């Protein structure tokens, strides 16, 4: 019998300790809104930063996110599904970022289609600062759940929601751009575009945007 999602999350939290990611508390205690360490570089959003609204697209200058880091014990849930090349590359990028930045990283895995919405609920119940989603099959379930939980921040890497609310930020590029809701992947979809370099940049740029309250937008990374 497959273990429940809560057990999966608990086991992942234990694994995070083994791999060196921080686990400062049980996440049950409230704390202030996380603030970034460092500042965005010139050219991250351009002069239109103040007018960026949900569904707007920003094309940041490569490396303009490098100066931003999460605060100590930043709480992140990696929400993932699928074992295809893009999903694996994104999961690796999130885990490597988490280790380098010493974030408190836990993982919830949706093993089959019936687990997709429950996995999102499971991730939110852990009360993270941010949920990072990796895997195209999560897009439609996220579109269903996220508008009803506006206080929870989500970051989608390598895909985007067709109509995101202000709590869902996405990082995308020409070879990715899966949108769900029957739109599927674009004709330019290319699994080979999910390189280690691009996936790492996507995670860092996306987290930098969220930490700076530039949320609900699509960050376009054709250049990294």
Image (cartoon, rainbow, N blue to C red):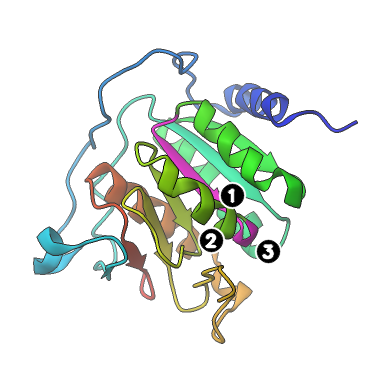
Q: Is residue 21 visible?
A: yes
Instruction: Determine which residue is flagged by label 2.
Output: 196
CA distance for labels 3 and 2: 11 Å
Q: Residue furthest bottom?
A: 187
Instruction: Say whether disc 3 or disc 2 marks the residue closer to the N-terminus.
Output: 3
| Comparing labels 3 and 2, the label whose residue is closer to the camera | 3
Residue lying at 38% horizontally and 29% vertically, measured from the top left: 74
Q: Quadrant of the N terminus?
A: top right
Report the Cα–Cα distance between label 1 and label 3. Answer: 11 Å
Crowding at dot 1, Cα within 10 Å, few <14 / some 14-19 / many 20+, comes out as some
Q: Which residue is mark 1?
A: 92
Residue 93 visible to an observer of this rendering: no
Residue at image position (50%, 14%) is: 26
**Mark earlier in primary sequence (1, 3):** 3
Mark linked to residue 85: 3
- Give x and y (percent) for residue 89: 60, 58
Q: Position of residue 126 (x, y in %)?
A: 52, 26
């Amino acid at each position: 019998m497959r273990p429940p999602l809560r057990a999966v999350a608990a086991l992942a939290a234990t694994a995070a300790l083994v791999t060196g990611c921080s686990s400062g508390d049980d996440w049950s205690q409230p704390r202030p809104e996380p603030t970034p360490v460092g500042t965005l570089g010139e050219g991250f959003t351009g002069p239109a930063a103040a007018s960026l609204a949900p569904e707007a697209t920003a094309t940041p200058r490569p490396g303009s996110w490098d100066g931003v880091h999460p605060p100590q014990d930043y709480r992140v849930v990696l929400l993932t599904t699928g074992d295809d090349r893009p999903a694996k590359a994104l999961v690796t990028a999130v885990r490597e970022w988490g280790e380098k930045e010493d974030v408190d990283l836990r993982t919830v895995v949706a093993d089959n289609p019936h687990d997709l919405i429950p996995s999102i609920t499971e991730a939110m119940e852990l009360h993270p600062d941010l949920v990072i989603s990796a895997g195209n099959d999560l897009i439609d379930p996220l579109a269903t759940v996220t508008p009803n939980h506006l206080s929870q921040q989500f970051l989608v890497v390598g895909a985007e929601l067709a109509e995101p609310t202000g709590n869902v930020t996405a990082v995308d590029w020409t070879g990715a751009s899966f949108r769900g809701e029957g739109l599927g992947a674009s004709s330019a979809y290319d699994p080979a575009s999910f390189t280690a370099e691009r996936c790492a940049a996507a995670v860092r740029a996306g987290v930098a945007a969220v930490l700076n309250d530039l949320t609900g937008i699509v960050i376009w990374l054709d250049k990294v």
